[in-house]
Every structure is written in C-alpha cells, then in structure tokens.
Amino acid sequence: MDNDETNAGVRYERKDIRLGCLLAFMVVAVCVIATLGYGVWRFFWWQAGVQQEAKRSPYPLAPALSAQLPPEPRLEQLDRMAGITSADADKSLAAKEKALDSYGPTADKGFVHIPIRQAIKAVAGKLPVRKQPPPPPADQRGLLEGGQSNSGRMFRGPLP
C-alpha cells in the first residue's frame, strides 16, 4: 500500500527545526545580549564619573576633603556626635558657677556682684507681682441646667 494514496489529507513536515535558522537566532541573541551588557557597563562607568565629580571639593584649592573637625570652640552637637568631651567646656561651666557663688567686681562701673543665693534672698519679697483676678464662680458662666444634655448650648449671663 502506498501511504500517499491512502492518507492524502494528512500532512507533516519533513524537518521540524532548521539548523541554520537556529544558529542564526542564537548568534543574533548573543550579539544583542553582548550589546546590552556593554551598554549597562558603560552606563555604570559613566555614573561612577558623575558621582566622583559630585563628591569633588567645591573649593578648587583644597587638595582633598578634610576629615578634621573645626578648631575650638565647636558646636556641642559636633562634639557629641564625635564622642568628644571637652575639658574646656567643663572648666568654663565651673568658672561660671564659681562666679555666681562669689563676690566681685562687674564690668559696669560702680557695681559689684554677690552670690546668687544671697541675691535671691534679698529680692524675694520686694519684686512687683501682678495680682491674679479671682476666678469666677463655677456656676456664673456654666451651661444652663449644667449636668443635663443641652444641645442648644445656652450660657448664663451676658456674652463676653
């Protein structure tokens, strides 16, 4: 029996895959991947230059960015973040406290300073104090029928 005559409506491919087309596709895919890889590598190389330029010192005469802190006196936050405890700050505070607890001349002519505790005792009852007005009675400006629900919120007395 002849297969062509008995199954005339059935068709099939003689070759499933063409080797030349497969090799051409693979060569094109490798070229595209290589081109994309080179492009990504160039982008990162360019980006590194941009970052290096951005980190460069804004002062053209400076050879490099300085890692040293500025000279004393510095802001406390810089000292605190760097973990530096300044003995000068402690000495300064101790000197100020000693000045507050002692007698001595001042920069103003004809004046002297006295210890702070003695100064507080001297002026304790002599400074003018404003008189506080007495608080209004609790029921003077409260809600009408206070304690019960009042959706109208009507107040007693004249409006301020």
Image (cartoon, rainbow, N blue to C red):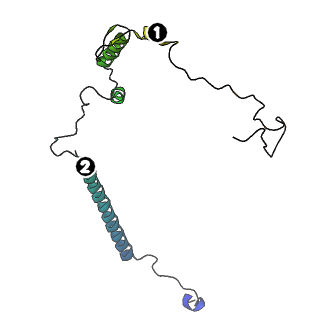
Q: Looking at the picture, which amino acid does disc 1 mark?
A: Ala
Judge by depth and name the residue closer to the eye, 150 or 110: 110
Location of residue 93 (image quadrant): top left
Q: Residue at x 47, y 12 (%)?
A: 123
Label located before the other in sequence (2 or 1): 2
Residue drawn where x is 19% and y is 40% of the image? 64
Q: Toward the viewer: 30 or 101? A: 101
Q: Image quadrant for the C terminus?
A: top right
Q: Nearer the viewer, residue 55 or 9?
A: 55
48 w.r.t. 34: above or below: above
Secondary-structure class at tag 1: helix
Residue 85 at x, y = what percent? Answer: 33, 20
Which mark's residue is nearer the viewer, 2 or 1? 1
Q: Give the label on residue 29, or none.
A: none
Quarter assignment of residue 138: top right
Which residue is labeled 2 in the image?
52
Q: Which disc is residue 122 wearing?
A: 1
Residue 75's spot in the image, x, y percent? 32, 29
Disc 2 residue crowd, few under 14, some 14–19, many 20+, Cα 10 Å: few
Q: Is residue 158 left or right of residue 73?
A: right
- Direction from residue 146 to residue 115 in the image, left or right: left
Q: Amino acid at mark 2?
A: Gln
Q: Residues within 10 Å of mark 1 (few under 14, many from 20)?
A: few
Check the image and report above or below for 126 versus 155: above
Whole-percent x, y for residue 84 in the image: 32, 23
Question: At which x and y percent is residue 44?
Answer: 30, 55
Task: Classify the position of the N terminus by image quarter.
Answer: bottom right
Q: Is residue 46 above or below residue 153?
A: below
Report whether 1 appears left or right of 24.
right
Splitting the image into 4 quarters, where does residue 77 fall?
top left
Say if mark 2 contacts mark 1, CB within 8 Å: no
